[in-house]
Image (spheres, grey):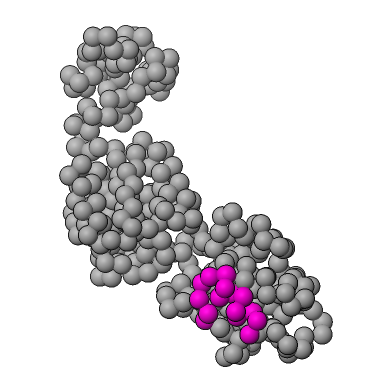
Amino acid sequence: MSGTEEKRPAGSGRPTSRDVARLAGVSHTAVSFVFNGRAEGNLSPATQERIRQAAAQLGYRPDPVARGLRSRRTAVIGLVTDEIASSPFAGRLLRGAMETAWASEHLVLTVDSGGDPAKEDAAVAELLDRRVDGIIYAAMSLRRVRVPEGLHRTHSVLANCLPEDDSLPAVVPAERAGGRTAARLLLEEGHRRVAMIGGQDDIASAERLRGFRDALRAEGITVAKDWALRTGGEISSGYEGAIRLLDGVPPDRRPTGVFCYNDRVAAGVLHAATRLGIAVPGDLSVVGYDDQEHMAAYLTPPLTTVALPHRAMGEAAARLLLDSIDTGRTPAATTRRIACPVISRASVGPAPTW
């Protein structure tokens, strides 16, 4: 190993690789082999284990600066976001990326640009100056994004967004499949009169609705035009849509199941149902989307929802980036779609027999 680790600075209690070698009764080179990943074929398993036990006993960790100088890596990756670090949706994605990186002995430096393209470019430039091994760019909502300037100069992966120029690999939710899943939740309980409330002019809305219609069409069911209400993505949007669908409508002429664009819309639907005296799930079943933390599980009734796989996206993006760093090969600019799991609670029940 380099001289950076060969001598313990005066007054420092930090153990060195030479301390480990003395305790394990091996050469300094043997310790270097173990902590540089070159032990296989050079040292017996017993010797490797003796070195690791000595390192654990001393509390030894390889010097990341010295290791970086040798490998030309810093063991640090950057994570640039638009607004995700300050949003309630981001925690799981960030945790997934950070824990995956940590398991591979990498740290993550996170920069939130607040949605400012100039800040994104500056953040990428700063991370490149600090010689990070690679960069993840993550977005708060699924959309096509301008690739920040400089991102092509290092190993890079996008999370929860797609590059406008299709030039980089991306990890996104399987939104169309999620819409199919939501439909099946209602179909399996016998619902045939179903509606969709909420949504915006974005990729997620279009894909969820497309998947929802796919599953219904396979069963010979069509959503009536006036039962597909694109009212927005907030609680008020769900309330407004539910009032339009349900208020003053006889039970046998209204939907028995509603798929909501997200959990906030579902909260509005539940509020409207309560006001109108419509029991959930006895008279109306409600399916949300997102599994929003600190919300979906605490509604009345607790919301059955299709979860956005934030943590899995963070893990997959970090793993793809780390594999690219390890192999030195740029991954193909393809899109990996992560399944959206069902979180079953109490807002879906059998279709009423009117």
Q: How many marks on residues?
A: 0
Q: Where is residue 175 in the image (x, y as percent from the top left)?
A: 49, 69
Measuring 60% from the left and 58% from the top, which residue is drawn there?
295
Q: Nearest the camera: 272 or 279? A: 272
Q: Is residue 157 above or below residue 229?
A: above
- Stretch of the chain drawn in magenta: 230-244
Q: In this view, does 81 lie to the left or right of 231?
A: left
Measuring 27% from the left and 9% from the top, which residue is drawn there?
11
Q: Where is residue 169 in the image (x, y as percent from the top left)?
A: 32, 61
Q: Position of residue 98 (x, y in %)?
A: 41, 44
Quadrant containing the C terminus in the rendered view: bottom right
Q: Nearest the camera: 246 or 33? A: 246
Q: Is residue 226 above or below residue 45?
A: below
Quadrant containing the N terminus in the rendered view: top left
Quick check: is 351 in the magenta stretch? no
Quick check: is 240 in the magenta stretch? yes
Q: Is residue 126 above or below residue 1?
A: below
Q: In which quarter of the image is residue 294?
A: bottom right
Q: Is residue 124 left or right of residue 198?
A: left
Q: In this view, does 161 lie above or below 269?
A: above
